[in-house]
Amino acid sequence: MKQILFTVLCMFLTAAGGLASAAGSVPAEAGAPGDDAIKFGLFADLGAGDFLVSDHLYLRGGARIEVTDGFVMDLPITAVFNWSRTDTAAEDDYVLLDIGILLKYYPGNGNFWTGLSLFQGVGFIGDTLPEQQYHYMTEMVFGYTLVLSNGFYIEPSVIVRDPLGTFGDALDYIQERVPGYGDYRVSLVLGWIPWSFS
């Protein structure tokens, strides 16, 4: 089960790095706002450390694309493992996988931002799967970007799942099988934007 997730994450990060290299990317200038270059980077949620005090392992990472001032697109991938299910019956041997597109808006080009998922698909992978394998979801996210040197940044944020209750049945179904996939999550992201291309 963990091998499947590791393979998926490695494939995604390899493809993301290859995309930037194939586009003829050059190193990004850290802290150079206002230029017309498209910036590309990667991020990881440091909140995975909560497995020390919880019954699940929550992994989240992905790619970041800065297309224009004030707008950023994140392509997050989330995987949730339940420790309580790993040693139980074979029918519970699965992992939740959440893939989405998050559009973030920085009002006034400041550091505070709000985001809304444009697309988000949730499914299960593993040896045995629940009856309903695929679901749609939406998230609203609020956060703050702290820019560091050499293209690095830190983003604390709060993720609210299904804020309008549109996918309530799907969220209930998912949480019944993977309790670690909660209604909200406090996240601390570390990101790096090493590539820029026109």
Image (cartoon, rainbow, N blue to C red):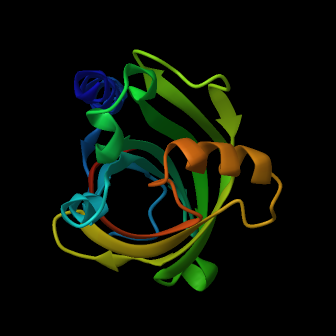
Position of residue 121 in the picture relative to residue 18 (left or right)? right
Between 123 and 118, the one lying in front of the other is 123
Q: Is residue 95 visible?
A: yes
| Residue 171 vs residue 87, the one in the foreground | 87
Q: Pinpoint residue 186: horizontal percent, then vertical percent.
A: 43, 73
Q: Quadrant of the C terminus?
A: top left
| Horizontal relation, residue 88 to residue 149: left or right | right
Image side of residue 48 versus residue 110, left or right: left
Q: Work out whether residue 137 can be spotted.
A: no
The furthest residue to the top:
127
Residue 69 higher or lower than 107, as above or below: above
The location of residue 115, given as percent across then percent down, is 61, 66
Residue 44 at what x, y percent from top left? 29, 54
Image quadrant in which you'd find residue 6: top left
Q: Residue at x 59, y 37 (%)?
A: 122
As drawn, which residue projects farthest toward the front? 89
Q: Position of residue 60 (x, y in %)?
A: 36, 49
- The number of discs equals 0
Q: Is residue 150 above or below residue 131?
A: below
Q: Residue at coordinates 77% horizontally, 54% vertically from top-left? A: 168
Name which residue lies at 43% across and 29% down: 92
> In this rendering, is residue 12 above or below 34?
above
Of 74 and 149, nearer the camera is: 74
For the N terminus, the image quarter is top left
Q: Is residue 36 above or below residue 173?
A: below
What residue lies at 35% left-to-right and 38% top-to-bottom? 85
